């Protein structure tokens, strides 16, 4: 890596609904005390997984079924949106892009689409 490079940004071309305001927010949040900033979106989905140690039983991941939350009653979860990442050189030299000194830019759910398949591309064309 060139010694004059202090920060590296990765803007994903597979995220077609990137808006200027998201990048402006990224720049505001990339303060001296911050090592990285990346995009997230909020999800209110209740997640389950198969537990191999319980013979493939389906178990909740992010909630307690005895106190099943209503969407209106919880803050949800932040999921990486994959739209952009920016990190300091020192962090990258450690082989990492994120650490515990990160900030996030929350992306509106309607703007989060990663084009990884032909079907994703067709959906993006319809949404545009």
Image: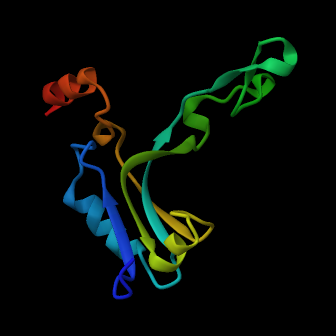
When asked about the image quadrant of residue 6, the answer is: bottom left
**Residue at point 50% right, 37% down?**
43
Left or right: 110 as drawn, with respect to 66: left
Looking at the rendered image, the quarter that the C terminus falls into is: top left
**Residue at point 22% right, 24% down?**
123
**Residue at point 51% right, 63% down?**
97
Determine whether 59 is above or below 77 in the image: above
When asked about the image quadrant of residue 76, the answer is: top right
Left or right: 13 as drawn, with respect to 99: left
Left or right: 17 as drawn, with respect to 70: left
When asked about the image quadrant of residue 17, the answer is: top left
Q: How far across and how far down the image is residue 107, in percent? A: 36, 49
Count of marks overlaid on the render: 0
Instruction: Name the image colouring.
Output: rainbow
Q: How far across and how far down the image is residue 22, in percent? A: 29, 59
Q: How far across and how far down the image is residue 108, in percent? A: 34, 45
Determine whether 53 is above or below 16 in the image: above
Looking at the rendered image, the quarter that the N terminus falls into is: bottom left
Left or right: 76 as drawn, with respect to 82: right
In the image, 71 versus 25, the foreground residue is 25
**Residue at point 30% right, 36% down?**
110
């Amino acid at each position: 890596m060139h010694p004059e490079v202090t920060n590296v940004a990765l803007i994903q071309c597979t995220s077609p609904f990137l808006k200027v305001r998201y990048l402006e927010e990224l720049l505001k949040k990339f303060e001296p005390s911050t090592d990285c900033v990346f995009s997230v979106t909020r999800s209110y989905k209740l997640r389950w997984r198969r537990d191999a140690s319980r013979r493939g039983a389906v178990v909740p991941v992010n909630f307690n079924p005895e106190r099943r939350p209503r969407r209106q009653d919880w803050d949800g979860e932040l999921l990486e949106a994959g739209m952009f990442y920016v990190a300091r050189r020192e962090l990258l030299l450690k082989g990492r892009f994120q650490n515990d000194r990160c900030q996030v830019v929350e992306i509106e759910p309607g703007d989060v689409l990663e084009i990884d398949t032909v079907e994703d591309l067709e959906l993006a064309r319809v949404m545009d």
